[in-house]
Image: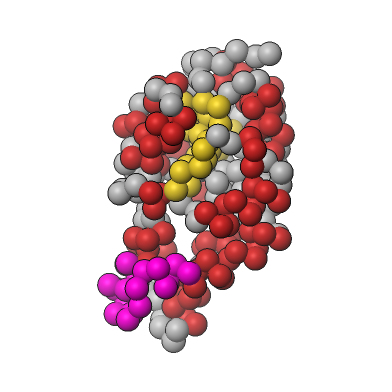
Amino acid sequence: MFVTRYKAAIFDLDGTLADSMRVWDHICRDWLAAHGITAQDNLEQDIERMTFTQSAEYVIRTYGIVLEPPQIKAEWEAMVICQYKEAIPLKDGAAEFVKELKDQGMKLAIATSCFPAACEALLARHKIRDCFSAIVYTDEVSRDKTFPDLYLATARRLTLAPESCVVFEDFPPALSGVRTAGMGMAAVYDDSSADQWDTFKQAADFAIHSFREFEQCQYLLRHRQPKFF
């Protein structure tokens, strides 16, 4: 059994465990187009850090849509749920790594901006749902991932001190939220943020391109000094 300085690993879902960012890249733009509305060029940039509910509120406010946020969220969910149930893969080596950590006695959780039906469907399909003691969604807290709320809520759900947790995340702006929460930061490579990768991995405690390198991942959890793969 390898010994880690952390008691828990908190994983983002989309872009970290799941190879799913392509599903979200244009969902809001496609939904607006289906309603006969041309989205502004900066749409994706504007909603990048928002929760699901905040994104719905944004399109209502910005485009003058006469719908309530729950209605919009339901339509977005319908657009993507089949892909989570049937098609979206996990990142290479992710399932094996998660199972390895669980077998080694670490508590595991997910902290995600995804919505429950999609998250649960994907985890069940890949047979890793029982690896996680908790799943916390950004809609359960008042602020986005650039703030510590989501991560602190997840630590509370695990009944652990924040400093005993490490967060695996592909979203560079989340670094500020993780740091404010007092947790360790593991940067995970995803093509969606490739242009920020060099800066992201240098700022994180450690960084990985793939979960497939089990020995390297375990090394990172044992030692305090940064090491990049």
Task: Name the magenta segment's main secondary structure.
Answer: helix
**Residue 85 to residue 136: above or below:** below
Name above or below for residue 75 compared with residue 139.
Answer: below
Q: Position of residue 174 (x, y in %)?
A: 40, 42
The quarter of the displayed image where residue 63 is located: bottom left
Q: Is residue 80 left or right of residue 39?
A: right
Identify the residue at the far bottom of this view. 36
Quadrant of the rendered image containing residue 177: top left
For the point 47% across and 81% down, which residue is it?
A: 33
* Residue 81, x across and y down, in percent: 60, 64
Q: Residue at x 46, y 73 (%)?
A: 29
Question: In the rendered view, does 22 fall on the left or right side of 69?
Answer: right
How many marks the image carries: the answer is: 0
In the depicted structure, whether residue 122 falls above or below residue 159: below
Q: Position of residue 37 (x, y in %)?
A: 41, 83
| Magenta stretch contains residue 120 | no
Q: Quadrant of residue 85?
A: bottom right
Rendered position, 176 above or below 76: above
> At x 53% / y 29%, what residue is drawn?
9
Instruction: Please report the residue visible at 34 percent of the width from the left and 60 percent of the height from the top.
Output: 54
Image quarter where the N terminus lies is: top right
Image spot of residue 189 (x, y percent): 56, 41
Coloring applied to the structure: secondary structure
Nearer the observer, 65 or 139: 139
- Residue 60 in the magenta stretch? The answer is yes
In this rendering, does residue 118 appear at all? yes
Q: Is residue 204 visible?
A: no
Quadrant showing the C terminus: top right
Image: magenta residue range: 57-74
